[in-house]
Structures are given as C-alpha cells and as structure tokens.
Amino acid sequence: PMEVSSKKAVGRFRDVVPASGSKTRDPRFDKLSGQLNQDLFEKSYSFLNDYKKSEQEMLRTSIKKEKNQETRANMESLLLKMVSREATEKQTKRKQQLLRERKKAEAELVKQGKKPYFLKRSEQRKLELMDKYQQLGEKNMDKILAKRRKKNAAKDHRRVPFKRRAE
C-alpha cells in the first residue's frame, strides 16, 4: 500500500537506498557452478590419497619413537581415526560401485524391453550385506557369526530374571 500503517512500530533499520555490491554465492548450491561429477572429482584429487598414506606411515614411525605416553596416545588415536576414515571411504566406494553395476544391468534389461525394477532400500541393504560377507570370506564370516552368537547369548542371559539364573 502507498500509506504505511500507524499501528505498527517503525523498524530501526530501513533500506532507504539499496546497497550496491555483489552478493556472495555458495558454489555448492549454485546452478552456475554446474553439477558435481564424483568420478572426475576422485580422479582429479587422487593424489591426496598418497599424501594420506605417507602421513599414516610418518605417524607410525613417530609413534614408535615417542616416549611420552600422552603424546603417544594422542598420535595413536589420530592414526586410528585416519585408518577408520579410510576404511569407511573404501566401503562407500564399494557401495557406489555395486549401485552403478546394478543400474547398468537394469538399463540393459530395460533396453531389451523389460519393465524397469527399482530396489527397495531394505533389499539394497541386504545385497550390500551379502557383498560384504562375500568380501570377508568364509573363515572370517564364521568368526564374525560366532562373536555375534556369543553377544546375543550374553544379552539373552542378562534378560533372564536373577532368581531363575541361580537354579
């Protein structure tokens, strides 16, 4: 409206003259920056993996030389973080590869004239789990299952009432 209401309080800071200047933009969310190509990104920055491995080796050697227990513990925790981060990255890459393979196979079936089928999340998780167990091998799988059985048995034992345990 042309007239400002007298019932509302006037704001302290008004934009009388619009401020000139360029607005900053975040390339992660801006369309002008284009889309992220994950494969190209990984290829371009693959040299960082070499740096990370060399850092891990340097840490390992410095842990062996270190005499102070506190700094040694800090270094070991840092090394553990780096190793676990590397393992999770490896797992995510494997999952992406499996997803790509499934998509390619599905695209081939669609080209042949079949109806497209999209996996549910639960089915996807099952396939990933099956692949993980295949990667581990039979011996490791037996060890893992034995540990899991033991853990579940301990949980069940805790749930049993205390009086019945004594009998």
Image: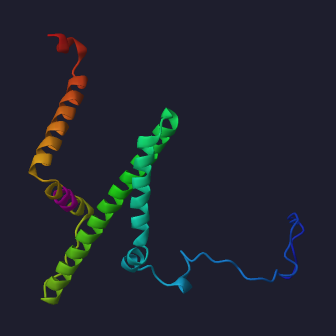
Residue nearest the observer in this picture, 150 or 159? 150
Is residue 76 placed above or below 10 in the rendered structure? Answer: above
Is 25 placed left or right of 106 in the picture? right
Residue 130: x and y, percent?
16, 58
Confirm whether the magenta stretch covers residue 18: no
Residue nearest the observer in this picture, 81 or 32? 81
From where the camera sits, is residue 89 visible? Answer: yes
Q: In which quarter of the image is the C terminus?
A: top left
Residue 107: x and y, percent?
20, 83
Main SS class of the magenta portion in the image: helix
Query: Residue 108's quadrant in the figure?
Result: bottom left
Check the image and tell me how it is coloured. Answer: rainbow
Residue nearest the observer in this picture, 83 or 116? 83
Q: Which residue is drawn at 14% across and 38% down?
A: 146
Q: Residue at x 23, y 18 (%)?
A: 161
Is residue 46 placed above or below 150 in the rendered structure? Answer: below
Residue 138: x and y, percent?
9, 50
Magenta stretch: give its range. Answer: 126-132
